Image (spheres, rainbow, N blue to C red):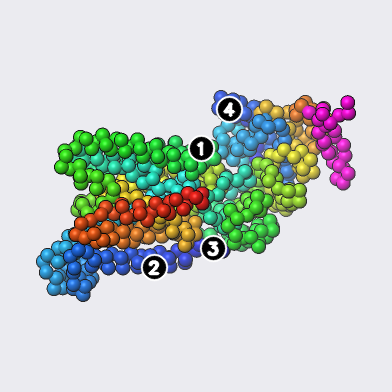
């Protein structure tokens, strides 16, 4: 029997997850192809980079110019994608909904690539067009997936396949407009890659992740009822139209900002909300904030694996998350 | 005093008229049952009464205020709906499900938490619907009848003075049908509530309803007490089947038995 979710339980769970996130940020920044002295690094991190604590110039730069920003970006991307996944699942009334599988990440990727090809000099166009792409893809999936009785798993997945394949050919088309030297790094980026951390996009990604998780959490009670069915939600007093627009916009923004920063990291939005619901119950008041924090930890760990298991070479982080996510997807599909 | 009134209501649906020039009044402590053949517009009418479907003409007054001027939550505090349940794809406990009925009362529609009062009300309606033992179970582990009772409990938890029920007894066995309608009767009598029940079960309607509304092709063809409406000729006209109406051996009210042509002696 699952206990009823209370404010107390929510605060305790989120505090524990926040502590896990802090631990992941600190410990994972010590791991990498270049070994760093543990004590001095911890001291430097504790001082938030204001003193070197005996680290050499190179070590200090590796820690604060490369690792910490990359880990923070991983946290923002993971938190964003897990929150967006939880939002789409409530909106589409389907635990299989996930931004990557529905083609929404591809929509954001088309937006990002369009920005790179046509407005390459202006970094700000990337998240804006990525958001636009994600929003259009979301609307397309929503319209295609919605049958009379909500979206059946089969219909939703088919809608996702159609949107994904259509947008994949658009991506191929845009790729041909690029020069050959950039194509290789783009294929890597498309699979989800955190190595190309751009300084300007990091604060954007972090702000969007926090704001998005907060807004969806503040609509959690409405989402709880929406999850049971649109008619039920309407009858019980939810302004279904307004909540739907909020989830559309916020989830698209979350996917847009993370894809603009790191490409399409798949399955995070499936794995993490599922684990959150499994351990804490389906109440969105706890599962959304828990998914946001858990998603951050998940992608930090996955990216540490991606940059260390075949060091000094790297894997795209999306390859690691898909290795974990695809089997879980099959399991969920069999149960659905 | 009327809790809910509809005047000259017409609803067009997919270029088809679903409800035409229909008026009805729901009064405290009264159960009204809508009966009629499939496709008569019964469910559409029910949906329009809490704003789910917008009428193309006519007015709906809730406590004498036009329905379209009221916001969603204030409507849901006054009108509860029991409709065919949607398929549940997320694990939700019975208690969580029933607490959903308290949503419209929350001071904060977003992140707020249930108050002590919400929990007491949920407890009371769970007891009333005999679900106490099941309150910690997941909804998708319940039988069809148990789920229907949970749906009823959630509607009662809203404490709304108006109950709209769409085929509430469709999935229920004989004893649960009567139990469920007894709950509705009880709520109407004790809390001065009004109920509108869409049903195919004419005999159940005759037994529990104070007022019957017989619909055909979107129109209210007959309306009145069960004795007034359940006349053999009226039912034959509407349902296009020969019926026998006699007195119920226990209640003395009208009892309807269809007599299909093939059952007749040669």
| Real-space CA distance between mark 4 and mark 2, rounded to the nearest whole angstrom | 55 Å
Q: Secondary structure at mark 2?
A: helix
The residue labelled by disc 2 is A16
Q: Nearer the viewer, mark 4 or mark 2?
A: 2
Residue B216 sits above or below residue A40 on the image = above
Q: Residue A280 colored magenta?
A: no
> Who's the residue at 57% across and 38% down the image?
B51
Q: Secondary structure at mark 3?
A: loop
The residue labelled by disc 4 is B12
Circle on res. A147: 1
Q: Which residues are magenta?
A: B241-266
Residue B50 sits above or below residue B147 on the image = above
Query: Is B85 positioned to the left or the right of A138 in the image?
Result: right
> Who's the residue at 79% across and 43% down the image?
B207
Question: Same chain, marks 3 and 2?
Answer: yes
Question: Same chain, marks 1 and 3?
Answer: yes
Q: Nearer the viewer, mark 1 or mark 2?
A: 1
Image quadrant where one finds the N terminus of chain A: bottom right
| Real-space CA distance between mark 1 and mark 3, rounded to the nearest whole angstrom | 31 Å
> Who's the residue at 31% across and 45% down the image?
A256
| Real-space CA distance between mark 3 and mark 2, rounded to the nearest whole angstrom | 19 Å
């Amino acid at each position: 029997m699952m206990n009823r979710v209370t404010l107390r339980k929510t605060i305790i769970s989120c505090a524990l997850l926040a502590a896990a996130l802090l631990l992941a940020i600190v410990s994972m920044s010590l791991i990498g192809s270049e070994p760093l002295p543990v004590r001095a690094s911890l001291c430097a991190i504790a001082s938030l980079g204001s003193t070197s604590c005996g680290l050499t110039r190179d070590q200090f730069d590796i820690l604060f110019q490369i690792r910490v920003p990359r880990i923070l970006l991983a946290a923002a991307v993971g938190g964003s994608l897990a929150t967006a996944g939880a939002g789409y699942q409530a909106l589409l009334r389907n635990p299989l909904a996930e931004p990557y599988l529905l083609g929404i990440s591809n929509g954001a990727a088309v937006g990002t690539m369009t920005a790179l090809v046509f407005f390459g000099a202006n970094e700000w166009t990337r998240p804006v067009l990525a958001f636009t792409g994600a929003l259009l893809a979301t609307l397309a999936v929503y319209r295609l997936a919605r049958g009379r009785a909500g979206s059946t798993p089969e219909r939703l997945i088919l809608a996702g396949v159609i949107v994904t394949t259509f947008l994949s050919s658009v991506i191929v088309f845009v790729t041909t407009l690029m020069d050959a030297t950039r194509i290789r790094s783009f294929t890597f980026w498309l699979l989800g890659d955190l190595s190309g951390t751009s300084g300007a996009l990091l604060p954007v990604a972090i702000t969007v992740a926090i704001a998005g998780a907060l807004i969806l959490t503040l609509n959690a009670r409405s989402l709880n009822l929406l999850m049971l069915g649109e008619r039920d939600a309407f009858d019980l007093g939810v302004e279904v139209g307004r909540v739907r627009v909020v989830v559309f916009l916020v989830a698209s923004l979350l996917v847009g900002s993370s894809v603009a920063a790191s490409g399409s990291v798949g399955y995070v939005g499936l794995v993490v909300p599922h684990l959150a619901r499994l351990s804490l119950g389906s109440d969105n008041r706890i599962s959304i904030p828990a998914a946001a924090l858990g998603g951050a930890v998940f992608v930090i760990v996955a990216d540490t694996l991606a940059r260390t298991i075949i060091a000094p070479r790297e894997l795209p982080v999306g390859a690691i998350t898909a290795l974990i996510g695809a089997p879980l997807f099959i399991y969920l599909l069999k149960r659905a | 005093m009327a809790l809910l009134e509809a005047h000259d209501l017409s609803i067009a649906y997919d270029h088809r008229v679903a409800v035409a020039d229909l008026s009805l009044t729901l009064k405290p402590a009264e159960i009204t049952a809508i009966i009629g053949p499939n496709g008569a517009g019964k469910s559409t009418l029910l949906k329009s009464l809490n704003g789910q479907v917008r009428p193309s003409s006519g007015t709906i007054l809730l406590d004498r205020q036009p329905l379209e001027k009221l916001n969603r939550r204030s409507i849901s505090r006054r009108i509860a709906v029991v409709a065919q349940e949607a398929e549940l794809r997320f694990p939700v406990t019975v208690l969580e499900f029933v607490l959903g009925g308290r949503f419209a009362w929350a001071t904060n529609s977003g992140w707020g938490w249930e108050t002590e009062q919400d929990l007491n009300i949920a407890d009371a309606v769970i007891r009333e619907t005999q679900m106490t033992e099941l309150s910690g179970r997941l909804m998708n582990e319940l039988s069809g009848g148990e789920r229907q009772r949970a749906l009823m409990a959630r509607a009662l938890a809203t404490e709304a003075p108006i109950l709209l029920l769409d085929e509430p007894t469709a999935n229920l066995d004989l004893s649960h049908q009567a139990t469920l309608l007894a709950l509705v009767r009880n709520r109407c009598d004790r809390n001065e509530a009004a109920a509108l029940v869409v049903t195919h079960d004419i005999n159940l309607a005759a037994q529990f309803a104070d007022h019957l509304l017989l619909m055909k092709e979107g129109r209210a063809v007959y309306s009145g007490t069960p004795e007034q409406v359940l006349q053999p000729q009226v039912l034959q006209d509407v349902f296009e089947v020969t019926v026998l109406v006699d007195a119920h051996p226990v209640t003395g009210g009208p009892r309807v038995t269809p007599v299909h042509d093939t059952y007749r002696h040669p």
